[in-house]
Image: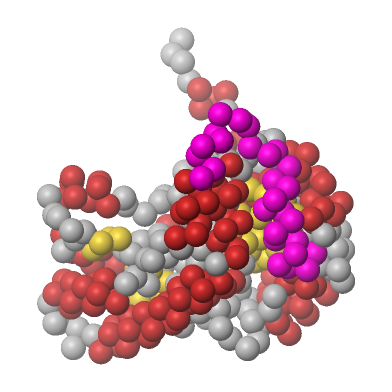
Amino acid sequence: MTFEPIALAAPGVRRLSPYQPGKPLDALEREYGVRNAIKLASNENPLGPGPAAVAAARAALEGVGRYPDGAGFGLKRALAARLGVDAMQITLGNGSNDVLELVARAFLGPDTEVVYAAHAFAVYALVTQAAGARAVVVPARDWGHDLDAMRAAVGPRTRLVFIANPNNPTGTWLRAGDLEGFVRAVPENVLVVVDEAYFEYVDEPDYPDTVGWIAKYPNLITTRTFSKIHGLAGLRVGYGVSHPAVADLLNRVRQPFNVNSAAAAAAEAALRDEAHVARSRDMNRAGLRQLTEGTKKLGLPHIPSTANFVCIEVGQAAAVYEGLLREGVIVRPVANYGMPRHLRVTVGLPEENERFLKALDKVLGGSRR
Ligand SMILES: *Cc1c(COP(=O)(O)O)cnc(C)c1O
């Protein structure tokens, strides 16, 4: 008999395909022999973290002989004060992906269903399948969440709804009135996770801050992260805010030391560094304009985005992606999101955006104009 671990795997895990991250810079340089490559593929802050966050992480390294504070007291207290909630409502995660997984682990099982939108963040499908639950994927409207159709998809077995606002990879977003109408209409025994990984980037007047809704809708869970505007993707810190009884359940399945001490210290410092957040937001706003105006000039449509990335319709995206790699520019193909004609481009430094636009023009050979 041959050793067949796949036959031993839990049913949900057998059909799972792993999350596909963006290509790392050193892999591109190794494989394609290009130098000075740039990466606009993982929605990272091109400015990186602010100096205060880096200093706090460095200082924390002196103490790594000890286990971190398993309760995350300092960071939770800082978040609670900032968000106007009780520390008991917060669940810290090793990135907000970790929190999404904790929600799945705490609430899903084989007889449950999860509703989310087509082209929504890939982790929803991953954690749903791994938990052995059934995914109900609702077709999108104009690339965004169709909340009416999602409401109609909620049935007696639905335990959880995932909503990304704004959504990755499409960049589409939901208005406060529409989203609150949805949350109000969903039965209270269905949890609604609103994933706000790009919250700090959005500057639309109708964009909701759902943390303020939790007092009214106890089935609501808001998740946010330090990976995006705070520039701490490599350290892995995110959090969920929920009703304290929900947070208690999430904390039961959480590994006791899931957020390391350097990450917690950096996150606390990053939260206070409002200047870095403002600088990052301003730079992103200008960069998003640079990318969309530049690609418009090349005759390419894009999906309007409020985040730090934009999906550009390039036609044969796989070939264009390859061409860009040869020019030393890494972007993200999104065929695995059902979008084979688009590439997702993260807003970079002004000179990186310019380099992407030049490379794209070259790869398309001017033939599009
Ligand atoms: C990046 C991202 C996250 C979280 O990433 P973490 O690094 O795990 O915090 C969550 N949701 C969406 C939609 C994202 O794009």
Q: Which residues are magenta?
A: 59-85
Protein image colouring: secondary structure
59 w.r.t. 120: above or below = above
- In this orientation, does residue 22 appear? yes
Whole-percent x, y for residue 225 in the image: 58, 59
Relative to 347, is 238 on the left or the right? right
Q: Is residue 222 above or below residue 200?
A: above
The answer to which of 245 and 257 lies nearer the viewer is: 257
Residue at image position (16%, 63%) is: 327
Look at the picture and state if 103 lies above or below 205: above
Furthest toward the top, the residue is: 1
Q: On the picture, is 37 further left or further right than 343? A: left
**Residue 348, percent from left and from top:** 34, 70
- Residue displayed at 63% across by 88% down: 205
Residue closest to the eye, 54 or 134: 54
Residue 50 image offset from top left, x and y in percent: 46, 63
Comparing 210 with 188, the one in front is 210
Query: Whole-percent x and y of residue 160?
Result: 74, 57
Task: Please tell me which residue lies in front, 211 or 104.
Answer: 211
Q: Which quadrant of the structure image shows residue 165?
A: bottom right
